[in-house]
Every structure is written in structure tokens, then in C-alpha cells.
Image (cartoon, helix red, strand yellow):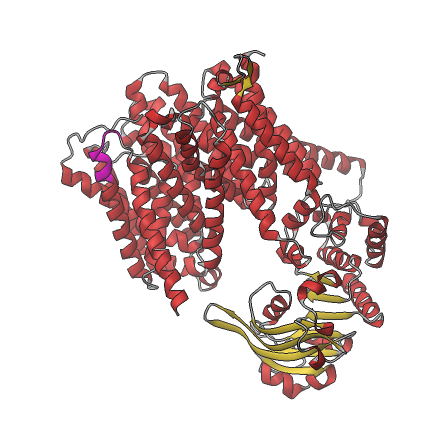
Amino acid sequence: MSGNTASIKSNTAIALQAVQVSYDAIVALDSVTTDIPLGQMTAIIGPNGSGKSSLLKAILQLVPYSGRITFAQGITLEQMRPRLAYVPQRILVDWHFPVSVQDVVAMGRYKPGAFFNRLSAQDYEAIKEALAETGLTAFAKRPVGALSGGQQQRVFIARALARKADLFILDEPFSGIDSASEENIWQIAKALTAAGKTLVMVHHDLQSVAQHFDHVILLNGYCAAAGPVHEVMQPEVLNAVYYSRLPSSPQHA
Amino acid sequence: MSDQLWILCTGILVAIVCALPGSLLMLRRQALMGDAIAHAVLPGIFWAYWVSGGADSLIFLPGAAISGWVAAQAIAWLSKDNRLSSDASTGLVFTFLFAVGVILISAFSRQTDLDQECVLFGDIIWVPLEVFRTEQGLSLGPQAVWILCITLVLFLAVIFIGFKGWMLTSFDPVFAQIAGYRVWLWSAVLMAMTSLSSVAAFRSVGAVLVIAFLAVPPAIAALYTKSLRRQLWDSCFWGSISTVSGWGLALYWDVSISGMMAVMTGVWFLIVWSFLRIRRWYKNTSYATSHQATPTS
Amino acid sequence: MPESLWIHDAGLWWLLFGLICIAVSCGLTGVFLTLKGEALNGDVMAHGVLPGIVVAFMVSGSRDLIWLIPGAALSGAATLWAKRWLVATAKVRPDSAAAITLSVFYGLGIVLLSKVRQSGTAAQAGLDRFLFGSAAAMLTDEVWIAVILTLSVVILISAYYKGLTVFVFDPEYAAVAGFPVQRLSFLLTFLTLICVITGVQLLGVVLVASLLVAPAVAASAWTHALHIRLILASIFACMAVLGGGLISASGDGLPTGPWVVVILSFFAFIGIGKKYFVRKLR
């Protein structure tokens, strides 16, 4: 749909217009209209049940939604797919699957329509680089079940890196991982945005938002606030949504 | 080729034909779907026998696989769109279709040369006798073997050509979907393969024991494999070992061949598991004795 | 072909009462079981009772339920125990473990059954009814057993009603709130085992899962209130069991199980259809 290209700002990575997600009669996310900026690191935050994962799923068309979601230059998700990389929650995957670290990273280079899916030299190059960036080169042949939580998360990051994408979408990549892995992932994220890539992350830890992100979307079943990090990460704004004092963890029990 | 050899050959083919989709089902945590499909093919099998007027031609058996595939789609639809829990939708669909199958078979057993016996036990004994014959009356070998071979070649092609796709759609379907894979299509193909193997195996081991071959050999391989390739090959191996040992013991003790084959899948599981346990214990104790200090975790 | 032994000493009403008892206990337990999402545990146990029944027969030489029931109970319990062992110790995925135990135990039952069959048709008929079920084959004593077992089910459910309800809806909350979750879990398993044992005479090993699942599914379409669901499920189960029993008794050698299942499934499909159209029309 290129009809409204003119109205999409050139520095927008994802444009959302009146996006609503409902499961049967329950509205999980009500009429979100906002733009996710290009080349910056955006955090999607909010209390439990505020619709963070619904928003992500709507962008990735994993759930039906009403409203419009377009990507840079007014292109659709289908056109965006080759330039898009997704890092899911670790919990959704069966880590006892008989695959090695390298196998999983290689999955980032598969092409959906191809028979046999032979990987080219270029593909192998990308895989090697991705493993090096995440510090997993030594683990390449290891079965994924033998890894720690932090290492598993880095495998997913490596898979996303291998795609050489422009837009990275991550779902809570920092939950339950060790500090070394965390450091590694922040480094990678910074390097990506420095190179002009766009990162969108569902994040749960309010403490680290101001330090690392450029742009924030605060959800509470609707879009409570969206803008540069220092505008949104103000006590009044956050209190209105989280109902308790900072800096201790503001999430509901 | 002697009759007994044909029976063995059939058994091994059944094992392999079931181990392949069975491995994928197991990895996708859909083992009970295999259970459901194996039951649900029964009405389709009745249809195949009815249409062909008896056991003259098993050509219609692939058509019978459709009822299994339909069952899988029905279960998926019920669990998703209707928010019925997956165990309830599975239990509902497979019992209904199995019941329909039993009613049709017992009502029309004269016309179809099928009866409840056959449904439960299969009659692998008769396999060598139903052969394809050329116009000159020359035997081309048992029909069951032909059908199983064709099915096997088909499965190997599908799995080999789409290997990376199977790996990805089974390991991380959400990532696959976002990358542009039609995950529903891969799933539908797997359900079709499972139906086909249930139908192809039905003749040899009967409706319910197919499940043993779909579920157990893959689980044996999963006890120790680290790659998908090994998983697929080894489950075929364990399935074959179970059929051969089951056949041998069944003849020795004069009991149901198909039942014994199913039991042997379980026996081999225990044997492999015990072996791995003992080997691990042995490694741990020899490590402990050769390194006096406490081992690092 | 399993023989439909005609009704012996049991008066028709007494037999029908027995059928109703079986239906009620399965209907009630099935509601809790499906809410917990463990309906297929019943299927696993059902396939697993077969070897126990045959062994009990071989040991006692009698096809009386009073001998077969302990065998069935032990065997069914063993199957579930094996499944849990596979998950806990052999690290098998839970759905795989269910499929493995049900098929291997069932296979064992078939092997033993084939051994028994060699000794003649009387033994055969006595045990074959557990494969596909037969209403008409129940004798007076057996109806008594069904009645007693059903009474136990009803008493247990009434006694533990609140606990069961909370446990089934939210086991974590139940644990935190102080309910004896271990005991409740065991209770549910025990109830399922009783239902499976009584149900297999009627529907046979493969199909008895339907009697646990379908009435609950059907009832859930018409009400959200648990106690009404329990009543509705029992009613649907009774109608199906009586209907299926009558159909099978009227024909020559028609197995009961499949007919009961067809009727049960109809109720369930009607319920699903109703829910579907209500949603679409909203």
C-alpha cells in the first residue's frame, strides 16, 4: 500500500496508525498511533498485560489487528521480511532439539522458497561473523541444549545478526541471563545503531532504559506515552502507569 | 523370496516409514497428534476397501490417508479457533472417527474382507500372499511391500529436499513464519505423511500399534542424538530392530506378531536408556577416582 | 467378532441403572479432567488396563469383574506411573511419554490376549468385550460393582468439591492458599482410574476417552457454572450410554462402544457449533 507514502516521515522505521489488537471480546491494545524512528534504539515498556507482546506480534503479523502498520518508505511486512530480523523469547523454544549452535545461526540465512536451501560462501561468511560478534565461535558445534541461558540468548542474537538485516525486533532479550552475556548484547546493540540499523525491543527493566535507549513507547493497554527517552522516563509519566514509587521495581506483583 | 523374509521386509519398511514422520512429530511436541491420526484413518481405510471391493487392490489406500489428514486439520481448528484445549479436541476427534470406522467395518465386513480383528492386530501373515501379478500371472511381490516402498521413497524425497525447512519449522516456527516460511503448509505436509504411514502400516500392524512405531523409536534416538540427521536415521534403525526382534520372539512364543513388535520398541527403549545410564555412571566414577580434587561444575 | 451375550440374571432396569452409574461417574470426573487439561491421561490409562485384565484372567481363570478389576487398576496405575517416570527420569517430552506408554502397554495386552485366545472362544468372548465394549454383557454382580464405584466417585467429589475446583482452575493459587494439592492430584488420578475401569466394559479400551471428554465439552457450551456443567455432563453421558446400549442390544453383535461414542460426539459437536455461531453472530 503506497498510497500514503508522502505522509510517512523519512526517518520512520515503522509507522503505526490506530492499531488495535483484540482477542475475542477482550481488547489487549487499544488504538496505538505512533512512529518508531529509524536508526535508533526504541524500548517498548509497560506493566504486565499492557500489550507489549501484542504490539510486537501485530507488527510481525503474528496476530490479527485493525489499523495500519507500514515500514520505512511505506512498504509492507512482506517486502520488509528479508531486511527484518527477529529475536524471540528463549522460553518458546525446545532447547533439547538436536541442533548445534551453528545450525541455529545458519537458520538466519535460509530462504523460504528454496528447495535444498544450499548455503553460499557469502552465507557462511555471515554466519562466521555473527558467531564472532557474539563470542560463540568456540561453541559452534555444541548442541544448543548444553548452553546456559545467556549463551542461548546470544545464539538467537547471532541468528538475527547473520541476516544482515536493517530492522531488529527483540522480545525481552535480557530476561534471566548472566551479566557477561548482557554486556555482550548491549555492545552489539550499540554497534548496530551506530551503523544506522533500527532496534525495537520489548524491555522489562526500567532502570536500564534511560541509559541505553533513544526512544521509548510506554504502553498500558493503550499508548500512554511515546517519544525521546528523557521525555517519557519522567516520574509523573511513569507513575501514572505503574502506580508506585521509583526507583524500586515498579511492576505489579 | 521366502514368505517369512517378505514379512520381515514388510516389518522393517513399516518401521522406517513410521520413524520418519514420527521423529518430526516428536520434535514438534505433537506425538499425540500421531496417536490421533493413527486412529482417525480408520474410516478412510474402510472406504478404500469398500471402493476396491475387497483386498484385490490396495491402490486406494493413499486416498484413505485423507481421513487422517482431515482429522489433524479438525483438531488444529478446534484447538485454535474454538479455544478447546488441545487434549479435549484430540480426544473428541479421534474417538469419533475411530468409532465411525469400527461401525462401518463391522457392518460391512462381508463386503470388504475387513473385520475388527484385522483392525486391531493387522495381518502381517497374509502379506506375502497378496501380490501384484502381471498379465502372465507372474508375481511381482507383495502389494504391501510395493506400497511401503513407494511411500518410503516419497518420504525420503520430501525430508531430504526440505531438510533445512523441516529443521527450522520444527525448532522455531515463529521465527520461520517471520522469515517468510509458510509454516502451516509444512505442518500440513507432516500430517499428510503421518496419515500415509498410518495407512501403509495398518495392513501389517493394525490401527493402534502404529502409534508405537510413530512414538517409540524416535524417543530412543532422542536419548542420545545431537543432530537432526542422526535422529532420523537412528529412529529408523531402532524401529527396524524392534520389528525384527518382535517378529522373532512372537514366532518363538506363538503370540501376536504386531503386539510383540510394539512391546519390543518399549524393551529396546529401556535397554538403550539403561546402557546410557550405566555408561554415564561409569564415566562419573572413573572421573572421580582419577581426579582426586572435586570436579568443577 | 465379540459375542453380544444376552442379559443374564439382571433385570433390564437394573442393567440400565448400572449403565447410568457408569455414565454419571465418567461425566462428573470428565468435567474436572478436561478443565485440568489432562483428559488424555484417561486415554493412557485406558490403553494400559488391557494387560492387567488379561493377566488377572490368566491368574484367576475367571472373567468375573471382581478378579479383573484389581488387575485393571494395577495395570492402569502402572501405565501412568511409567509415563511420569519417562518424563521425570528419562527426560522424555510429556506428549511423547503418553504415546509411548499407551502403545507399549496396549501392545503387551494384545500379546497376552493372543496367548489366551488359543485356549478357546469362551475365554475370548469374556475378554474381547474390553476391546470394543458391550453393554449387554454386564451381569448382576457387575452392576453392583459399577454402582459402588459410582457412589465412591460421587462421595469423593462432594467431599473434596471446593478443593478440586480451585486445584483444577489454578493449581498454583491452590498450593499458595493451603489446599492439599498433592492429595487432590492423586484424587483426580484415582477418580480417572475408577472411571476408566468401569468405562472400559462399556466402550472398550480405545474409546473410553470419549466418555471422559465429550460430555464435558458438550456441557461447557451451555453454561459457565461448574455445578451445572457437572449435571449437564452427566445427563449427556447417560443419554449417550443408554442410547448406545439400546442400539447395540437391538442388533446382532453390534459393539456398544462405537455407538455410544457417536452419540456423545454429536452432543459435543452441537455444543461446539452453538458456541461458534454465538461468537460469529456477536
> Can residue B140 be seen at all in this image of the molecule?
yes
Residue A176 position, x and y percent, is 68, 62
Identify the residue at the far bottom of this view. Answer: A236
Residue A136 position, x and y percent, is 81, 53
Q: Is residue B161 above or below residue C226?
A: above
B212 horizontally vs B88: left or right = right
In the image, B133 versus B100, the foreground residue is B133
Residue B170 position, x and y percent, is 63, 48
Q: Is residue B111 above or below residue B104?
A: above
B52 horizontally vs C156: left or right = right
Asked if residue C2 lies in the magenta stretch, the reply is no
Residue C271 position, x and y percent, is 34, 56
Q: Quadrant of residue A207?
A: bottom right
Q: Which residues are magenta?
A: C245-253
Q: Quadrant of residue B282?
A: top right
Residue drawn at x 45%, y 47% as measured from the top left = B90
C220 horizontally vs B209: left or right = left
> Can residue C104 be seen at all in this image of the molecule?
no
In the image, C77 versus B177, the foreground residue is B177
Residue drawn at x 22%, y 28% as measured from the top left = C5
Residue drawn at x 62%, y 53% as measured from the top left = B182
Q: Main secondary structure of the magenta part?
A: helix
Q: Quadrant of the C terminus of chain A?
A: bottom right
Asked if residue C246 lies in the magenta stretch, the reply is yes
In the image, B281 versus B109, the foreground residue is B109
A59 horizontally vs A161: left or right = left
